[in-house]
Amino acid sequence: MNLEPFKNKIWLSTATKHEDEMKYIQEAFDTNWITTEGTNLVEIERQICEKVGCKYAVSLTNGTAALHLAVKLAGVKEGDTVFCTDMTFDATVNAIVYEKAVPVFIDTEYDTWNMDPAALEKAFELYPNTKVIVIVNLYGTPAKYDEICAIAEKHGAIIIEDAAESLGATYKGRQTGTFGLYNAISFNGNKIITGSGGGMLLTDDLAAANKARKWATQSREDAPWYQHEEVGFNYRMSNIVAGVVRGQIPYLDEHIARKKAIYERYKEGFKDLPVTMNPYDPDTMEPNFWLSCMLINEEAMCKQVRSDNDTCYIKTSGKTCPDEILDTLAKYNVQGRPIWKPMHMQPLYRMHGFVTREGNGRGNTNAYIAGNGIDVGADIFQRGLCLPSDIKTSDEDFDKIIQIIRSCFE
């Protein structure tokens, strides 16, 4: 393949700037609201509530802060078990651990790469006293909420929705960020819209919103002096960051449309390869297509072995693996990423509970065999990768990236 490396690096996903952000930042400076109050904060809370369809939004420093306060609002205490999506970023779990609770990881299913409802039902058999479920919409694809919400209701459990990756995605016409009693979104620099940082807690419960706002302001009491009766946090979003978010919100649908076009371009470019794209059910859900990902068919995988910090693989004609593709992309100045490594495989959480649809996933000697349906998250991690999905990358550059990836199968 006679292709030259990209002169300018192709990134996985970066912020896309428009002209409005500087207008609202400048407005904050001109009015001297360079603080954690101001018009930008008021406006983004109003606009996100309107877009998502929730009643109340609390602007915070990041999505992790929103998740942490959601866990507190759910009444999680030290020693409580909390069911959590297994294939996710560590921030989801950190919010549970901050409250000294015990995360129990629920395996993934192949249809959406999200929490498996069958495994969740099995988890209630093993941990019947659990009353909180933290669920993630992976890479912008909604989970199977009809099934999951029914299971939660059956067992009297609260849902916390980590919608950090899925702003603008819908399940049966309903926006993500509304399926939990408490929900979190993120405006991190690589998200579908960004403030460089920032996040929000979303809820329909006014008392919960007020409580979260108080906790985020160091739990200051309503008194003439600084009065504190409980532990609080400095989780307030800056009016400057809110200015960036405010300038981004009008472009959310435009960003989603471009992300979907990228996903479809990859899908068409790989249609004759032994791979599939990150899946969703078009009859019930519309992802925001935040990241396009691919999964290599089991029979097309060359041998790949990963330790905690390193990897090796054997190049094989007609076959490849995620790490070979990622290495090849890097040679052409292109950034890709492995799929989120499941939490039950992380050194920090290897002693924690892990439940598959077959039951307790720990101690099963077949748990990591690809395709056996026992440990789905481990299988997807082994065979999957995240593709460059930056909306500023041109179609011609995506076609070149497709060529590079195709070459790995030769």
Image: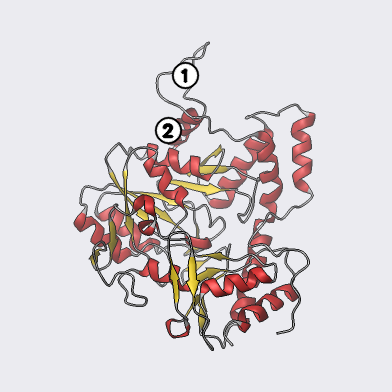
Mark 1 vs mark 2: which is more N-terminal? 2
In the rendered image, which quarter contains the N terminus? Answer: bottom right
Q: Position of residue 133 (x, y in %)?
A: 34, 51
Of discs 1 and 2, which sits in the foreground?
1
Residue placed under numbered mark 2 in the picture: 207
Q: Would you say 324 lies left or right of 71 here?
A: right
Q: Amino acid at mark 1?
A: Glu
Q: Nearer the viewer, residue 133 or 283?
A: 133
Q: Position of residue 75 (x, y in %)?
A: 33, 37
Numbered label tally: 2
Q: What label does residue 221 carry, if any?
A: 1
Q: Would you say 391 lies left or right of 60 here?
A: right
Secondary structure of residue under mark 1: loop
Q: How is the image coloured?
A: secondary structure
Q: Would you say 245 lies left or right of 356 here?
A: right
Q: Nearer the viewer, residue 336 or 113?
A: 336
Q: What label does residue 1 carry, if any?
A: none
Q: Position of residue 242 (x, y in %)?
A: 66, 40
Q: Position of residue 152 (x, y in %)?
A: 30, 54
At 53% from the left edge and 30% from the top edge, which residue is drawn?
A: 234
At 32% from the left edge and 41% from the top edge, which residue is drawn?
A: 101
Real-space CA distance between mark 1 and mark 2, rounded to the nearest whole angstrom: 15 Å
At 51% from the left edge and 76% from the top edge, which residue is drawn?
A: 321
